[in-house]
Image (cartoon, helix red, strand yellow):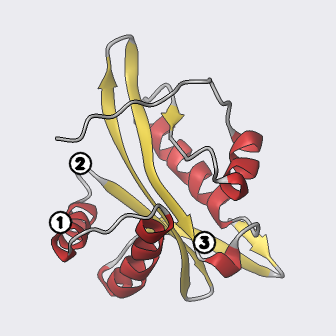
Amino acid sequence: MNEQAGRMIRIGKLVPSDRDDWEALFRAYVEFYQRVEPPEMYERAWREFQADTRLHALGARLDDRLVGITHFFVHPSTSGPDVCYLQDLFTAPDMRGKGAARALIAAVSDRARARGCCRVYWNTHESNSTARRLYDKVAENRGFIRYQIEL
């Protein structure tokens, strides 16, 4: 938990009553990366997060407000123990720099450690300077460049 002006940021699983707030945050994340996704993508993702078997989600709450989300999954590695991929991380614009994202990363790291993972990793766009200021404090940029083939 991180303190925010005397109030605590709490991290926990998303519950059914978070559905609308989660989608608003996830849509803002998708829009930030200038993508458009069909409504069924949000439905599929929510079902997966509620099942909590293959894909996982956590939320950051300040008081009763959902102010940040993260999505992650564990997968095997050819060279060692399983690893955890932190796929999405987003905080409400008015909450940036107040500890929610740092708390979400720490919570994902704790869960990955508990599952025997040897690392947590993620990607961000090189132009995302706001997020990179935090990432440079909590993780190491190993210099990898991502390539992608759309199918």
State the image coordinates of residue 47 (x, y, percent, origin top left). Answer: 19, 68
| Front label number (2 vs 3) | 2
Q: Which residue is mark 1?
A: 44
Element type at mark 3: strand
- Judging by the rendered image, the residue that carries numbered circle 2 is 54
According to the picture, the residue beneath numbered tag 3 turns out to be 10
Give percent across and percent down for residue 138: 71, 42
Separation (CA) of disc 3 from disc 1: 26 Å
Residue type, mark 1 in image? Arg
Quarter of the image with the N terminus in it? bottom right
User: Can you tell which mark lies on residue 30?
Assistant: none
**Precedes in sequence: disc 2 or disc 3:** 3
Neighbours of disc 1 within 10 Å: few (<14), some (14-19), many (20+): few
For marks 2 and 1, the one nearer the N-term is 1
Horizontal and vertical percent position of residue 4: 78, 76
The reply to whether callout 3 and callout 1 are in contact (CB within 8 Å) is: no
Q: Residue at x 16, y 72 (%)?
A: 40
Q: Reply above or below: 124 against 118.
A: below
Tell me residue 50's x, y (percent): 25, 67
Residue at x 30%, y 25% (from the top left corner): 76
Determine the CA span between mark 2 and mark 1. 12 Å
